[in-house]
Each structure stands twice: as C-alpha cells, then as structure tokens.
Image: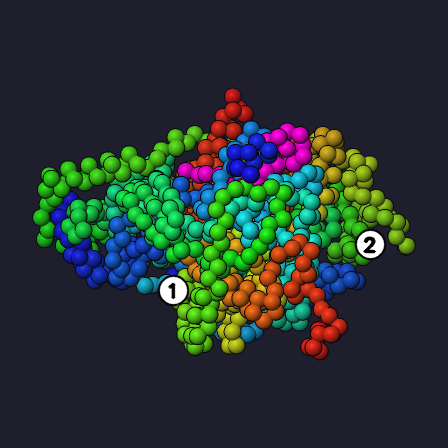
Amino acid sequence: MAEFINPYYPKKARIERTYFESQDRSLKTFDIKPVECDVPSFIPGQFCEISLLGYGESPFGIATSPTEKEFLRFTVNKTGFVTSKLHELPDGSIVGVRGPLGNGYPVEKFKGHNVVIVGGGFAFTTLRSLLVFMLHHRDDFKDITVLYGARTPDLFLYKEELAEWEKRDDLNLVLTIDKPYEGWTKKVGLVPPVLEEMAPSPKDAYAVVCGPPIMIRFTLPVLFKLGFSPSNIYTSLEKRMKCGIGKCGRCNVGDKYICKDGPVFSFEELNNLPEDL
Amino acid sequence: MRKEDVFVKLKDMLERGEIKGVLGFVKTNDPAKKKIYYTENPEEVNIFEITPFNTLNPVTFLLRLKRDNGKIACFLRDCEERALNVLVSEGKIAKDSVYVIHVPCRGALDTLKLKAAYGGDITSLDVQDDKVVVDGSSGRREFAFRDFLPAGCKNCEEYSSHADVIVDGDNTRIHEDYRDIKGFDTKTPEEKWEYFRKEFERCTRCYACRESCPMCYCEQCFVDSYDPLWVEPGLSISDIMGYHLIKMYHMAGRCTNCGACERACPENIPLSLLTTMISERLKRDFNYISGLKSDQKVFLGEFHYEDREEFIR
Amino acid sequence: MKRMTFTELVDGLSSWGDVFVRTKKGFEKDGNLHKAKSKNSPKEFLLPREEMLFVAYGSGDDMRVMEANPSKKRVVVGALPCDMHGLNVTEKNFLSEPKDPYFAKRKDNTVFVTELCQYATSTCFCRSFGIGPSSKMGDIVYFMLDDENIIAEPLTDRGRELLSWNKYEDAKDEDIRIMEEKLAEAENISQDLSLSIDHKKQREVYGSEVFKEAVFHCLNCGACTFVCPTCYCFDIRDIKRKDFVIRERMWDSCMYFIYSLEASGHNPRKERFKRAQNRVMHKFFYQPLQYGVYGCTGCGRCIDVCPAGYDIRETVLKVQNYLEVKNG
C-alpha cells in the first residue's frame, strides 16, 4: 500500500436497495452504503464516481442530503455502457465509489435568503439533496420555492417525497408536466411560462436551475425578466468526465474543469467562459 | 491547359459565381510541406501549388466543406479523382458539386520520410528526373525519387480523367505491375507476420491514416466504440493489428491507392503496401479497379442472382 | 562547471538507476546520444503511454485491490530545456491538489540530467516562453563540447550527491567560451513570438472565424498531442481479464471525436475545428489562466511531426492579432 491517499482508488460500497423511478425503467435509484467506512460528509450538489470494475466509472450527482447519514443515493439514467451495466446489478452487489467530488451548491451563501429551485426531468437528483438539506435546517433559510417539471407524471423522481413536501406549509412546491395527461390534476405547462406565472421575487433571493439544456436556455430569460442577476442564478453542469479531480483534461469549459471547479457555476461565471457545452 | 491559364479561368469562374470556392495545396514555412487551403477569394487562386510534395488527398477535406450552394473546384490527381468517383458512387458527394481540375502526377512523395532521411532543416528541394535534390542545414543531398514513393504510387492504374479542366504536365504513371506485392507473396506467413509486426510496432494509434483517408468518413469509427468493444485500446501488437486490419477490410474495393495514409503516418509505416495488396488481389481475382467511373458499382455493394456463393442470396 | 566525458557522466549515474539517453526516437535505455531534438519528449517518464492504476482480484466482498507502485529508479539524460520546461508545466496539473500519486512517485524516482541546447532548428520557438537554449533545469545540467567531452554542474542536492564532483577538474575558460558561443547561436535561431495574449478574452476567440480558418487544414489526428511535452490528457479504462481487472490510464487526445463524446450522444466538440481549437486554447488561454504559465514550450515537435503542414505558431499569432485588432 502506498503511503499517500490515492484519489483514483474507489472505496468499496454495497448497493442496499434499488428501485425504478419510472415505469419505462430508464431511471433507477440506488441506495449505496460504504463497506469499510462511514458515509462521507459532503455538500449538496457534489457528485461521486461510481465504478463497476471491468466496465468503468461514471459520475453521478448525490441525491441524498448530508443530513441523511445512512447511505448515499444516486439516480441513474440508463444511457451508456456503464449505466446499462449498473442497472443490471442486483441488490447487495459491491461497487466502487470515489468522492465526494466537485464544489457543490453555495449553501452557506444561501443562508438567510429566499431560494428558488427550478428543476426539470431527472436532473432533480442534486436538487433533492439541496432541498432536503434546507428543509432540515429550515430556520436558516427564508422562503423556499420549488418548481419541478417533467414530460409526463411518470417521469418525476422521488414521487412519494414530492407528495409529502406538497403538504408542507413552509415550502411552496409546484409540479408541472409538459402536456395534459389523463388523471393529472395539477399544473400543465412548460417550466419557463409556469415560472413566469409564479413570478418569485428576486429580492434577497438566489435561484438554482437544473435540467435539460433547452429548459435552462428558456428559463434564464424569465429569471432575468423577473429581476434575478446572473450572479444570483446557479446551475450544475454535466460533461464527459473521467478522473473527476481535474487531471485528465476532458471536462473543461474554458479554463474551468467541471469536475473540480464545478459542477456548480453561477451564470456570472459562465458568462466569462467560452460556450463549450 | 497551362497552369497560369487555369488560374485565370478559376478567377473568372469565381467572379461569375460559377464556382463557390477552390480547394488545393499552398506552401508553408517548410518547403517540404504543403498544406491544404480553401478560398472563395478570386484574388487568391494563383497561390495554389501543383507539386509532388502535396501529400494528402484533397477529397478528404472536400468532405469537410459545405457543398450545398455552389460547386467547389478541386485540384485532383488521377487517384484522387478516382477516390471522388468512389464517393460519388457511394452517394457521399453529389457529382455536380465538384469542379475537377486534373493535375499531372508522377507519384506523390512521402515528405515526412524524406525529412527523416535528410535529418535537418530543409531550405529547398527539387525533383530532377528520378532524383530529389534537397538543400538545407545538412548540406546538399540527393535521394532516389522512387525510394520515397508509397507502394500505391509505384503501381498507379491507367485512368482516363473525366475532369472539367486538365493542367498540362508530365503525367507519366509508374506502374511496376505489382512487382513488390508479387515479391512479398513469396514470403512464408511467418515472414509476412514478422515483417508487419516490426512495422506496426511503431504505430502510436494517432489515427493520422484514418483522418487522412477520404474513405474513412464514418462519424464514429469502430475503434471508438466501447460497446461492443471491437478492438481494445492500448498499444499491444494485437490491438494495433486489429485496428489496421479491420480498417483494411473496409478499404477493399473502395481504396484507390492514393497513398495518403502512408504519407500521413508520422512513423512511416508502409500502409500503402497493404492497400496495394488489396488492389492487386481485386484486379487479379475479380478484374476490378476501384473508382474508374463515378457510376461504377461498389465492389462489395452489389450482388447478382447468378452468383455462385449461397450466402449472398 | 566541471569537465568530464559523456561516458563518465552516464557511468556515474548508472549507480542510481537505469539510464535513458536521448535518441532520435525518444529516450532509450543505454541509447546513443542523438545530437538533435528527439522525436518524442521525455514526458512518458512521468506519464507513461499506458499506466496501471490498480489491479483488482476477486469480486464482491472478497475483492482485493492492489495499487500500482511505480518505484523504478531512472535517470533521463539529455532532456533539453524545452523538454524540462514541459515537465515543469505538466507538473502544475498533476501536483496541484489533489496530488496525483503516480506522477509524484515517478518524479521522485527520476533524475533529470538536462543538456544545454545547441540544436535549435527552424521549428524552435522556446524563447517565446521565458526559457531558451541556455536555461539550466533539472538535477544536473551539462553541455556537449564535442562528441565526447562535456562540462557539467549539479543544480540540486540530489544532483550534488549523485557524482563525486570533486574528482573532476574545473571547466577551462576556453570550454565556457565555446559553450557561450554555441548557445548564443542557438538563441539566435530559436524564435521569440513576442506573445501578449489577453487570456481573459477566451470567450471572444472561441468559435471565431479566425480559428475556423487557421485550423482548417488540421487532420484531427493525434500525432501532435503524443509528441507534445505538455499534452497530458488521459483516458481511464478497465481491462477485463478472466481472474482480474486492471484499471489503467493511457494517453488520450482532444483531437478525437470520442474524447468529449457524452453518453447521451451529445458532443460539445463535434465539429473538427473545435477540437483543434481546444488544443491551442488550452495551451495559450486556459493554462495561463489556471497556472500562470503557457502550456507550450516552443519545442516545435508538433510542427515537425504534422503530416498536414500545420504550424501552431501561425494560429497563435493570428489569434493574437485578431484580439488586438478587435480590442483596438
């Protein structure tokens, strides 16, 4: 054994539970617990590299809050080689975990402010982490507003929790789907117009926007129109990653590495970087 | 037509809008290296060069240009025009989107190999009959022209150009009737393997051969696939050979032996020997020469009901 | 400086570890010194083409993992100032937090003996980056007086300990004069591009026409990235065998389509020019912003190796000029 801490070395972890989030079985949630150590401390918005030896590694945002110390939760969208293999793993399997990696949301900055969370599709993972964290330290934050959009009701993540949160009176949660759907009695409409209708105040407020690029593109003008400044709007970026620690070179946007300097950036920061996304 | 007259014609055509742009080679700081250049400016047409040191195949770059509104004029040798024909027959390029300027060629020199043999800064180089005369920091030296030709250039097939305009010049093709290949065929399988193992050991998998090839236009190459993983990454000889041999399969009946892959190889691996071998077999066994016409049937892309082999039906 | 023969130097160093000497190809074990730039840079001594990170045996709870421990002691003789500067630049990436243990270990186990450069060619432009043929770097530095005689001096404690320096006579005034003359000659040949790029303007040049035109003739092969002393991008892959799995890293190149291809099929650098652009921007914009130093050392290897006649100097000067004109 080498005497230094090797950042490439994954820690053993066991898949405690898995369940599909959607009926089309493209989204699967994994609750993972490290075997040889405790769940590491982290900041909402950070991610881990999950490795399946023999197949490779992929980065996933941590969906649990640092306040939930039992396990780490990841929701995996089946798109590529590693994610397909991960989906096939039975409960109890051992995987490798490296992390937490990246910077995370500036939660200290958010304290004492209103926070508006705008999420779309399966990008809600780290937003869940942020939301649970804020609800746990509810007194540290002022108004919390959440707008969460999905294509169909089936594609919402964490449906049971969403139902719980909807009942809370210290949280304004709005769920919306793109098009009318049989049995859906809540909001219908794309995220940007619904947000415009909700018109959260920019005063003393930070906004966090995560979702598909197209949603972000159309949500930003709405936030600007409402009076949010680029320095008060944060997002979490994604790109092909390998090392996760800013060494291997591929996830750069300008002089910033998404894995090390990100994945969370304010739009003020992004405005100074090339549009290499 | 004289070169100067061709330039006048091109300038005129650009000004009238009959062609959109011109693609060809221009000089660089290094006399031994020419670079591909595309211009739409009529004043620039006379900077194009026609030399044996134009190493790459312009058709490769033609594929990278937008070819939708207007013709692109392109300086092409016989083999390069044949490559264009193959791409037309494969439906990759529209025939009327290219204005072909045929350029004379006696063989295209492997300048990287020449530079390595000379070993110093080259200030001037000149072809005199069967000699290449090089001047530079290591003094004046002469090399045999033939020694720096890829195998393909030594077995250049007869081709009557369908070009729109033909530039005057010496177009004496070298055709040694696949002498090298026939000689190579007398080796034992072990000797052949040993020869190629030694040559391919130098491969760094930089993929210059792939990127310089007009036939390698796949958006995603088979070596870039994780699932299925056709060839493992890395530099073990079996992986290197895996890449090159599968690539060669894809060349069969399509490659026109322009030799750009070999001239592009920074390690001077004789790739053209393999492509020439394919050409020789095709000619010998099937009487097929690729890219003679733009409406020629693709070698591995058709079948006949009277084909003897069962599997094809 | 002390006077000795090249053989004495190499023999003296062989007690520390395997000696690799600059050859035409790269740096080869017990090779014969090639009196010119080598084709490959010595970066592979700190970042090998393929490097095992660890090997895992068994599966599930019984899985055992063994980390690689690159402990071989080696001496690299004949790295030129541009090569050494390249390693110093690369080090900023690997030794910034979190430290790369493999790189660090290899660095500790490798002695660099650099040669003052009298081999400048028309593709050299090291003087653009605050170094030059006479820059002294590494553990020991030497100068070739002729085919065998050298003058050398240690630069670090390790360099001082490696040889019994007192054994050798001092360099003669004549030796120093020859050295200075030769190095001045080389200084004259190596170009100074007088760079004054405003790195913060990265967004302005990204995707601009000037880039599109400047890199049109680039093939997007990876030849330049492999010979470059500062290109360090790597890929991590698992090699699966019957009883074990090796996780290894290997050189990668930003020139490749697959380098930035995401699992969703989206590729931010789908267009070829964006990939060629990334290499230039990484060296001339991103690395200066990250580490305050250009990611290019002016060794000219990329120009030498390029099959397409691409010259990075042209692109950089065009981009610099574009920024100057644009911003008055």
Disc 1 designates what residue?
C69
Residue A153 tag number: 2
Q: Which residues are magenta?
A: B11-29
Horizontal and vertical percent position of residue B69: 70, 38
Question: Relative to the observer, which residue lies in front, B206 or C150?
Answer: B206
Q: Amino acid at mark 1?
A: Asn
Q: Is residue A209 above or below residue A228?
A: below
Tell me: B202 left or right of C16. Answer: right
Question: Relative to the observer, which residue lies in front, C251 or A194?
Answer: C251
Q: SS at mark 1?
A: loop
Q: Amino acid at mark 2?
A: Pro
Q: CB atoms at circles 1 and 2 under 8 Å apart? A: no
Horizontal and vertical percent position of residue B163: 61, 46
Residue positioned 82% across, 54% down in the render: A153
Question: Relative to the observer, which residue lies in front, C72 or C177?
Answer: C177
Tell me: B244 left or right of B217. Answer: left
Tell me: C66 left or right of A100. Answer: left
Question: Relative to the observer, which residue lies in front, B257 or A39?
Answer: B257
Residue C148 visible at all? yes
Q: SS at mark 2?
A: helix
Residue C96 visible at all? no
- On whether residue B23 falls in the magenta region, the answer is yes
**Outermost top residue:** C328
Q: Is residue A65 above or below residue B124?
A: below
Residue positioned 39% across, 33% down in the render: C193
Residue positioned 39% across, 48% down in the render: B129
Residue B198 tag number: none
Chain designation of label 1: C
